[in-house]
Image (spheres, rainbow, N blue to C red):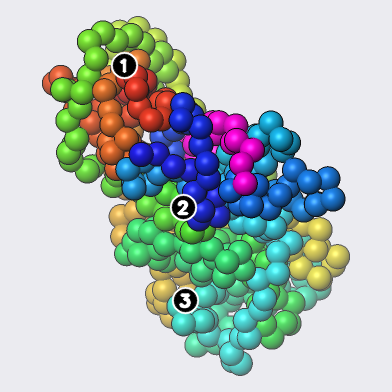
Amino acid sequence: MHEVRIDGQTVDLSPNARVGIEWTNPHFLWDSLSVRKMTIPTLGYTKRNSIILEHYELPLLGGYPQYRLEYYYGGQLLQEGFFILTEASEKGYTGVFTDKLGLFFGDYSGQKLNELDFGSLALPDPLIPVVTDTINAYCFPTVGNPDYYGTNGAVLSYTGKVNEYITGAFTAGPRVPMPFLGYFLRKLAELTDTTIDGSLLTHATYQHAILYNTRALDGASAVRLSQHLPEMGIEEYLIELRKMLGLTFDIDVVRKKLTIGFLEDMMAMPTQLDWSRKAVAGETKRTELNRRLELGYDLDSGDQLMKDKPALLANYMTPNPWSVSTGIAKLNSKVSTVLVDELTGTITTRQVGQTEQFNQLTQRSTARLAFWVGMDGGIPKASNILNENALYWNGSTGLAAKRFARLEAMRKDVFYLEKDFILTETDLASFDFSQKVHVNGTDYYVLNLVATLPVTSPVKALLARV
């Protein structure tokens, strides 16, 4: 009834072979993409297994023994990933399972975004506020920044504005392209031979999200995307973006597909599973001591306007509704946002820019997001708020209210249950961690599942009250 397939071929298993799994809910992990563990039994030394594993036990044969692995029960796929053979002899074949999330982006995993070759995009002449590549690729919003050339601005008759736009044309000052987030993700998928989709890319507001940076074109007629990206690894940037926007990542490692959604949308889904009749009597209840959320981000220390944290960009903290002090769960992102001048409606900063002029290429800026607003009063503008969706934490339009409200409400009354359930292989194969489960009058998220397959004993689960 159960089978292990390696590179699509069913291997021989001993009659009493057991497979162990431990699955962790990826939607409540903030510092990693996903965790799915699997223990594969030693495979017998049979003719079939030797052929499938390419006779790796023979001393004359080399290579790296990594194979695609699928585990089925009753024809239903329960888990897939990769099998790495670690030991081979006439006693059998021993190996480990990995979902290879750390290598989801192939050879590019671990490399800095600003070191990757995404290619370039030719710019129109004369330059226009938004440049497309079938979708919006770059925009050039005006930025008030008197410090862009440090103390040398007067030498170039610098007006204090980046991407200055007057009477329908850009002036001769510094021009800094801002990549659209959706375009960056599309180019990342093309480069790494992956698929990236999801509601982040189709959201009416976040389609206008842009990656703020300070790297000037310096007269170039084409934009090299890598020059305008933060000095962060691929996985690191995605994880930090997730912390800022409250994102969910659904990852199919074999098909190399990443679907990016919003945690708030996931938590708004109604409960559809009822495990009450599957529950084994008895449980252990555990208290969550850190009930309050604190949301914040690292500000760019190179921006003089960020030296003393502006009130608008202050951390958000859940008010304390209890008569006693409770612990705080901190969620801090390395991606932040910009300030906007109240009079001009344009981004404002005081930061030395990254440019060939005056040997300023060594200047760096940290990762920041903004929204492309469009033309306003004849000026191309970007902002930290669009369509009542802000990129700062506080207020009714802030990230705390828009992207973390349901998580915050859940944490106020959360407790955990360690409980056993009589689940079938079909239950496991069809289970989705984005779903809530109902158990005896209360709704929960499943945080962790531990089982031995084929299932001959209760499945151990860790639940969090919604």
Quadrant in the rendering for residue 360: bottom right
Give how far across and how far down residue 346 sits, in percent.
Answer: 49, 64
Give how far across and how far down residue 181 sits, in percent.
Answer: 50, 63
Could you tell me which residue is drawn at 54 percent across and 74 percent down?
138
Could you tell me which residue is drawn at 45 percent across and 20 percent down?
328
Give the prevailing secondary structure in the magenta stretch: loop
In the current view of this chain or complex, which residue is farthest to the front? Answer: 47
- Quickly name the residue at label 3: 136
Q: Foreground mark, 3 or 2?
A: 2
Relative to residue 364, is residue 35 drawn left or right?
left
Could you tell me which residue is drawn at 71 percent across and 54 percent down?
111
From where the camera sits, is residue 18 visible? Answer: no
Return the residue nearer the eye: 368 or 2: 2
From mark 1 to mark 3, how far is it between C-alphas?
Answer: 49 Å
Picture layout, residue 431 above or below residue 454: below
Name the quarter where the C terminus is drawn. top left
Indicate the amino acid at tag 2: Asp
Local packing at callout 1 (Cα closer than 10 Å; few below 14, some 14-19, many 20+) is some
| Circle nearer the N terminus (1, 3) | 3
- Residue 419, label in figure: 1
Mark 1 lies on a secondary structure that is strand
- Quickly name the residue at label 2: 252
